[in-house]
Image (cartoon, rainbow, N blue to C red):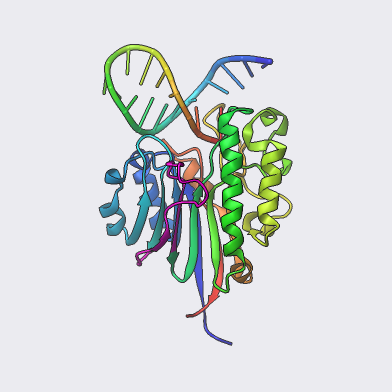
Amino acid sequence: MPRRRTLKLATFNVNGIGTRLPHLLAWLAREEPDVVALQELKAPDGSFPEAELEQAGYGAIWRGQRSWNGVALLGRGVMPVQSRRDLPGDRADTQSRYIEAAVHGVIVAAVYLPNGNPQPGPKFDYKLRWMQRLADHARGLVGQPHPVAILGDFNVIPTDDDVYDPKAWRKDALIQPQVREAYARLLAQGWTDALRHLHPEQAPYTFWDYFRQHAQRDRGLRIDHLLLNPVLAAGLRRAGVDRWVRLQEKASDHAPAWVEVSLPRA
DNA sequence: ATGGCTGGCGACGCCAGA
């Protein structure tokens, strides 16, 4: 048997890197993930806290945007080697929602799917087109002989088990049948939804809105997902959500979600 | 059934989030 190594991959929608930097640093120090996908930086490229993350031991690449969106990839002790900073399929799309790199021997895509509200409407149409573009690109990744992960905020509630009250969200873009079908078609390429796979009865939520103390009462949604191709899924060991981050003062409305995988040593 | 909260922007209230 070849020697193996364990890697922890995580995704975290920070809802503003400026406001959330202390939370991010505290979480990195406590949980020590090896690879991190960040979403909703809500900051231009020049405002990314490169030095603070380097001080914390992480190399980073990012694609920011003023006010909205923005994604990044972090590598513990290494600099991610960027392979893409755009999702193919629409040259006119300028929103910062995709970045891809090799990190610790894994090809990792950080994604921030469009919210899609209100639906129906142009924003919902954009969401569906974006999901189709993601599926087209992912088809070329899933069968790679290397480990590949797609990590991020998908803005998709996959099933009624992934929301505290499906009725309360029935008109929302995140739960619409077309969106669920698009997500199911993506998975059918051969991706493993890691949280669902290891928690088939009740997968943990990853988002709780700011209303009515929903975080404290665990009335949430599972919309941040970690998709693994078959090579990587073969080494899947554990998966979870660091809900303690969501319960901090001034927290993001999302918590970090993570997987632990065992890989052959290169 | 509705409105509840938060961040960014830029200067008081608005847009967007999910």
Q: Position of residue A33 (x, y in %)?
A: 45, 61
Q: Position of residue A224 (x, y in %)?
A: 56, 47
Could you say which is closer to the camera, residue A134 or residue A2? A134
- Quadrant (top left, top right, bottom left, bottom right) of the N terminus of chain A: bottom right
Whether residue A118 is visible here, answered yes or no, is yes
Q: Which residues are magenta?
A: A76-101
Q: Is residue B2 found left or right of A255 in the rendered image?
A: right
The chief SS type of the magenta part is loop
| Residue displayed at 29% across by 53% down | A50
Q: Is residue A199 found left or right of A155 in the rendered image?
A: right
Q: Is residue A44 above or below residue A62?
A: above
Whether residue A33 is visible here, answered yes or no, is no
Q: Is residue A98 found left or right of A262 in the rendered image?
A: left
Residue A176 is drawn in which quadrant? top right
| Residue displayed at 63% across by 58% down | A194
Say how many tags the image has: 0
Is A44 in the magenta?
A: no
Residue A181 is drawn in which quadrant? top right
Is A85 in the magenta?
A: yes
Q: Position of residue A79 (x, y in %)?
A: 34, 64
Q: Position of residue A37 (x, y in %)?
A: 46, 54
| Residue displayed at 55% across by 33% down | A209
